[in-house]
Image: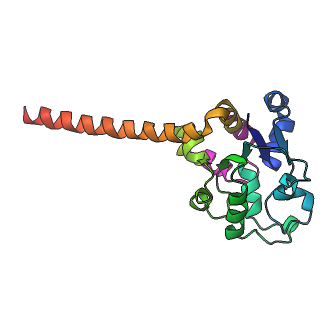
Amino acid sequence: MVFLIGASSLDNLIKKIPYSRRPLFGRSFSIPGLSFNINAVNKHKVLQNLLASRGVLAQKHKIVIWHDVINNSVTKHRSNNYKSFPLTELQKTLSKLSHRIEAIIYCPRAGTNDIFNELIKTGIPVIDVRKKLLSHRKQHDPQILVDLAQAHPSVALEAQLLSTVWRKRNVLRELIKRKKKTKNRSSSQKKRQKKRKQREAKV
């Protein structure tokens, strides 16, 4: 069973939608401001400290990292003395914890760079929210994309994402592969349609 870890976005969702607490009871941990950034003023909000041998999350494995934790890590804020965590250091930290992390749920926050490709290099499966958790229509909906890029996406959108992730929690890696297969099938259908039209044109 996976264990979900998030910051303010996840914490806000759980507080505002009581029913979301049931499936997550004992299977999640969220604190506003949580990150991997060692420059954080409050060291109790540095995730690797909590995952250390004497930390409150020392025994947790099969961890799923929510997008707000990653974005907090690379965002300058007064809570970290306006010092973002260097990407190379974030990669090293995640790589060291890769045996305990099942997946990272990621979407870039407005004002930050898209570090999806860099996260993949850690060896941890990374689920791109925009491509893997949104329908084709919503992937191209400007309002949805703007909402998703906020520091705190709407509760409704976060609830949808959490519902999908939790439903697929035991097959998150397959979720990534399954989406790729769907894309390949679509490409094959287009090729068949093109060949059929060519044959009809000859007749």
Q: Residue 186 location, x and y as percent?
A: 38, 37
| Residue 112 position by quadrant | bottom right
Residue 159 inside the magenta-drawn segment = yes
Residue 156 inside the magenta-drawn segment = yes
155 shown above or below 44: above
36 shown above or below 83: above
- Quadrant containing the N terminus is top right
Q: Is 4 left, or right, of 95 in this rendering?
A: right
Q: Residue 154 location, x and y as percent?
A: 74, 43
Q: Residue 68 location, x and y as percent?
A: 75, 52
> Residue at coordinates 20% horizontally, 37% vertically from top-left?
195
**Residue 151 seen from this side:** no
Q: Residue 36 location, x and y as percent?
A: 79, 60
| Residue 139 position by quadrant | top right
**Residue 81 seen from this side:** yes
**Magenta residues?**
144-160
> Residue at coordinates 54% horizontally, 42% vertically from top-left?
176
Q: Is 166 left, or right, of 12 in this rendering?
A: left
Q: Main secondary structure of the magenta part?
A: helix
Q: Residue furthest left?
A: 203
> Residue at coordinates 59% horizontally, 56% vertically from top-left?
120
> Residue at coordinates 81% horizontally, 35% vertically from top-left?
27
199 shown above or below 107: above
- Quadrant containing the C terminus is top left
